[in-house]
Amino acid sequence: MAKRDTSRDGFSNKLETFVLTHFRPLWMWLNRSKRLGDWVNGKIIDRAVKKTKCRPFQFSTLSPYTSWHSLTDRSWSGRHLPPKSQTGLPPVADVTKLFQRKPDIGGTLSKKSTLLFASFAQWFTDSFLMTADQNRRKNYSNHQIDLNPLYGLNRDVTLQLRYRSEEAGRKGRLKSELIGGEEYALRLLMPGSVDRKPEFSLLPLPLRLNADWPSGKSETVFAFGGDRANATPVTAALNTLFLREHNRIAGILEKNHPSWDDDRVFETTRNVLIVLLIKIVIEEYINHISPYWFRLRANPRAAWNTSWNKPNWIAAEFNLLYRWHGLIPDTLAWDGKKIPIDQTFLDNGLLLKAGLGQMLQNASRQEAGKLGLFNSTPSLLTVERDSIQQGRDNELASYNDYREAMAYPRATRFEQISGDPDVVAGLRRVYGDDIEKVEFFVGLFAEEAHPRAVVPSLIGRMVAIDAFSQALTNPLLSERIFNEETFTAEGMAIIAETKGLKDVVDRNVPGGAGNLFISMNQQI
Amino acid sequence: MAKRDTSRDGFSNKLETFVLTHFRPLWMWLNRSKRLGDWVNGKIIDRAVKKTKCRPFQFSTLSPYTSWHSLTDRSWSGRHLPPKSQTGLPPVADVTKLFQRKPDIGGTLSKKSTLLFASFAQWFTDSFLMTADQNRRKNYSNHQIDLNPLYGLNRDVTLQLRYRSEEAGRKGRLKSELIGGEEYALRLLMPGSVDRKPEFSLLPLPLRLNADWPSGKSETVFAFGGDRANATPVTAALNTLFLREHNRIAGILEKNHPSWDDDRVFETTRNVLIVLLIKIVIEEYINHISPYWFRLRANPRAAWNTSWNKPNWIAAEFNLLYRWHGLIPDTLAWDGKKIPIDQTFLDNGLLLKAGLGQMLQNASRQEAGKLGLFNSTPSLLTVERDSIQQGRDNELASYNDYREAMAYPRATRFEQISGDPDVVAGLRRVYGDDIEKVEFFVGLFAEEAHPRAVVPSLIGRMVAIDAFSQALTNPLLSERIFNEETFTAEGMAIIAETKGLKDVVDRNVPGGAGNLFISMNQQI
């Protein structure tokens, strides 16, 4: 592999990366400091978000001009840059080939990430990146981190997912059953069919569940709030983990607050769970992605007095840049065998057989694929094709336009994007010699990542912008609301003592997680 | 009238009022300065909003605890303070008597405000203060200044209010007709009935329009977007004024941008109209209310980098404190006669007879009533009664609790609320000697206003908080959007040259407004 030409990285970008990825002892010292660390945390986050202009976006995907309709109807996606239709682009099929994994070597594996990381990314982002199938410029997102894979997109769905206290004799619980001593959601479908049980009539059907799905598999589909929470046994395991944690915390709150009714126990538990998720997202997931030595903190104060604390609106670009299919390996290692990955889709049999702890350990022992071109598993190539087409349907500006909008100088040679000769040759084959033609979606994944980073630089920057500016704006983290009145003292304590997924697993599998390896990092 | 006991006004409040209501030459000099004036403007607005905690509110009227439901469902009203049910309150009927206008003298008149001011307050606030009739803790507001009295609360209504360009041969226009050379909205109802014409099937019926309404009056009801825009001939005149301005500006944009389609002309015109309204609200209406010498400016920058630029949510308290029925006189002077005010409700006959300019001049020549206790016209006493009841239904905290929340010391004697012996005696009669019992709604209007102010102090403070923090947060005023791309150069020029209602009238009545007296102030 040749060395990438870094002449167009930009001086201040280079300096910033250098400082944040060197001087490890300094950063480790700051990581141990409460007050100074909080201050540095605020500065790094503020600097990260301010790499581009803050919301409200000037345009949505509705129209190339601003209107009251475009400023208020969030079923159209936001956009960081105005539409700019590119002409003379190569056929989508040719571009799709840039994503094809080299079949002879079974793909390139990540040196840092596990399948648990990949599955968490999938499960988490499926809760707000929701392209409408009928019109790929639209979405059906709530634009919030609200744990809708667990609770549903709206209140009517939530009510079907809950017991009423009269039924259950217990307050605030989500519907569940015990199987082999472990707690799972109820099953969604009627036996031998792909029709929902009447009590779940308003729940979403799993995306891409077809009538010809093997009944053995369809009988393991859980009654979840999200239409993609059943996508793989690992995403289903994560949803199951949060379901157990919900019911566990509801039990604590019910006991400590006997005067509370069913609704109050439920809602206060949900408050805790949402913040628990945001904490894991920033402190485990984002820190796994980041190449920095400083460990970012889910400190709500970082957003209280900023100019970027503005209403959320998921952007079309954010939706596309999160298509991390390269992370998905070709096979899932299981009991010494390798199961082709597409056979695990929409099949929770493995989870039910292994149990939650083993399932998550399995995902933690499995290496994720490496994010980049030439590394998508064959069964996902149609999704890559659709993504390229979606970029064109949304008339996204070019890769170079987005570099510029995100404070990177425009690239002038393919070798500035990557040092990998295959990538350079691939780009040249598809786009000729015109670097200005490189599309946003392709350029994102063509970029060579920093050695300590999990994602290429422009993706990393844009993830940081949209993640911090939309996670820390959650109303539950706001100044008047992030307190014991909202979460209870015991809820605040649970939030404080949770550093990552393993802590939640520890509280929710038989015997705890002490002997289990549960990690987004290949090594801890 | 005795002198009010000012010992509990608070030192910093007194100082602030003193500085802002004295040193007139200094303020006048600042009023003429662009840059320094803008800076002072930002400081005064920021200070005004920060008198209390910023949004998101901890609670809505949904529940006495915080939940994802309470944080996201805006059909429940926000609240500045948590519910605090007061016990031992006097009967609502007794409290209502505190609002009864003294019939022998026909009420107290304002020394500063005209009926045009009162009608503008009514028409403007009717666009976001919308209590749901079925449940007075709920609302059907968009929580935005979006000119919905003109455009309707949602897109389906908007489409019925517009011509499609194919029909009209002109782009972006609202439906209208010429009567006596003047432009008016079409009529809503079918002749001789209170049923809507089919083309207006989705428009709201005017609130309190009964089937037994005289057909002569019902035939003058306009097809407006708001359910209260037809409430009086003056509110209908204001809506008509903005309808004319819409169609006038649409004509300019159509001419200057021949490539634009019907939607773009319409939407861009609406952008201009909404900001025009906000400008009039701050620069004419708020400055009329304010006792300060500095004239506040609708400078969008004042909100760009503030911690209080957060999503709007109309509070239950804001809804109640805006019940300014005292402003409404008993009679409307007309052609040397005095028409009882309740006979003018839901009757646009006067407007059609007089024409827009004359109607608005009539409203400008008529003095408004003075805001306060013992000054509501008899026909509105049932509304006062409902307001008192609404405060109790929403379990609002006491007047003194709100003083404290808004940075006023708690009052300890009735004489600190007002120097008017009738008011003090009235409060004592109803609440005994317990000042802590005084309800929010009653305390607000019992307060004696500053001599130069139009509203009592606590109302003034709370209006400022909610007005600035919800008007300047309009997305059209945000940093990336307040520019010529959104409004066009000619649109920006129209906004810049509009200082008040009279400028809009001048552009939209035959012969201009040169000889007309159009003013919220009794003298200019």
Image (cartoon, coloured by chain):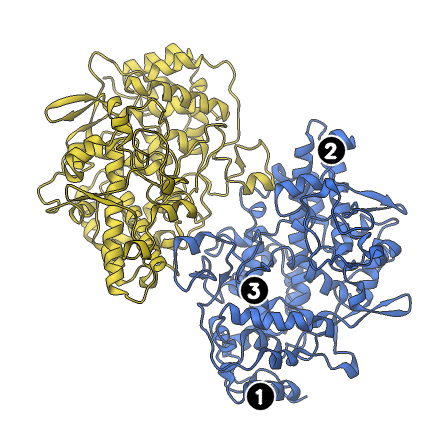
Chain colours: A blue, B yellow
Q: Is residue A223 above or below residue B259?
A: above
Quadrant of residue B461 within the rendered picture = top left
Badge 3 crowding class, 10 Å Cα cut-off, few under 14, some 14 to 19, many 20 or more, is many
Lower position in the chain sequence, tag 1 or tag 3:
3
Q: Could you say which disc has been placed on residue A428 in the image?
A: 1
| Residue in the foreground of this view, choosing between A106 and A459 | A106
Q: Which residue is mark 3?
A: A318
Image side of residue B115 versus residue A275, left or right:
left
Instruction: Examine the rendered structure and indicate whether residue B506 appears above or below residue B114.
Output: below
Q: The residue marked by circle 2 belongs to what chain?
A: A
Who's the residue at 80% across and 48% down the image?
A: A507
Confirm whether residue A78 shows in the render.
Answer: yes
Residue type pointed to by label 3: Phe
Q: Which mark is residue B410?
A: none
Q: How far across and how far down the image is residue B237, in percent? A: 23, 38
- Which numbered dot is residue A171? 2
Q: Nearer the viewer, residue A403 or B459?
A: A403
